[in-house]
Image: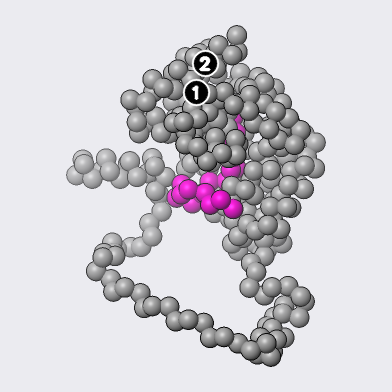
Amino acid sequence: MNRVREILEWYVEAGVDVLLDEKPIDRFSEPPPPPRQPASRKSPEQFLAQRETTPGGSTGKNPTQTPTTNSPAGSATIPDAAAIDQARELAGSAGTIEELREILSTFEGCNLKRTAKSLVFADGNPEARVMLVGEAPGRDEDLQGLPFVGRSGQLLDRMLAAIGLDRTGVYISNVLPWRPPGNRTPTPQETEICRPFIERHVELAKPKFLVLLGGSSAKTMLKTSDGIMKLRGRWNSVTTQQITVPALPTLHPAYLLRQPAHKALAWRDLLNLKQRLG
């Protein structure tokens, strides 16, 4: 029983806190799905007739396109190019960090907002020299509305304390301000629609140095496909429309909890940062 309890606690810490069904399902025993039938080809006359009888078909819009804005409360929204353009426009209109927070709190263009409990915007000192950027909130962060407050956040606090920093001396945020359900990996569309907001956040905070926590954050902010083991410990630059900031990628605290042997690598990165801070 103790072993079962440990496994369940590990699942909860990892963010797996939603049951998909009341009973376990053996997927291997299920029959394979039937093969998809090829769609029948329609003549131009049939296509036009169907479009005229489809709601919204006569407006000139694609009736199969999922709306991304002004959708009713509780409905899912799938980020598309139009929503990403709207996000850029809204993010660029923010003149202060508080205005950016207000814009995000009313933004309806990202489906993650529908399943998250809280907007997880930032924590720490917005005037600090160092800004840390993670990937996305987890379960504890979603409940409290603050970034890095769970086990990985506690480890992050200890890491910062090791080089003489705390949350009054740094500013902390994430690429995504809403928790993906079940802590799943964000889709590229979800990341792209949130990118304008975190880039504007950096512009408004004007940090002297950025610390990118984890591979997803580093890839997004540096616009690269390189893995974190190749990127970590090497200074790079994050460039937005208005600012260029030296950036140091390092390992995410959640990864270090799973791979404690790699804490030595993170310690080297922290010493690198401390040296830059003088």
Disc 2 element: helix
Q: CA distance from mark 1 to mark 2?
A: 7 Å
**Residue 94 location (% of width, % of height):** 78, 40
| Residue lying at 53% horizontally and 86% vertically, measured from the top left | 40
Label 2 packing within 10 angstroms: few (<14), some (14-19), many (20+) = some
Image location (x, y in percent) of residue 46: 65, 90
Q: Amino acid at mark 2?
A: Asn
69 in relation to 235, above or below: below
The answer, for residue 154, to whether it is visible in the render is no
Give how far across and how far down residue 169 sits, in percent.
Answer: 61, 18
Kindly identify which residue carries mark 2. 272
User: Which type of secondary structure does the marked residue at label 1 adopt?
Assistant: loop
**Kind of residue sitting beneath label 1:** Gly
The magenta segment = 172-189
Which quadrant is home to the C terminus?
Answer: top right
Which residue bears the numbered disc 1?
A: 233
Does 188 appear in magenta? yes
Q: Specify how the rendered protein is coloured.
A: one colour
Q: Is residue 29 above or below residue 278?
A: below
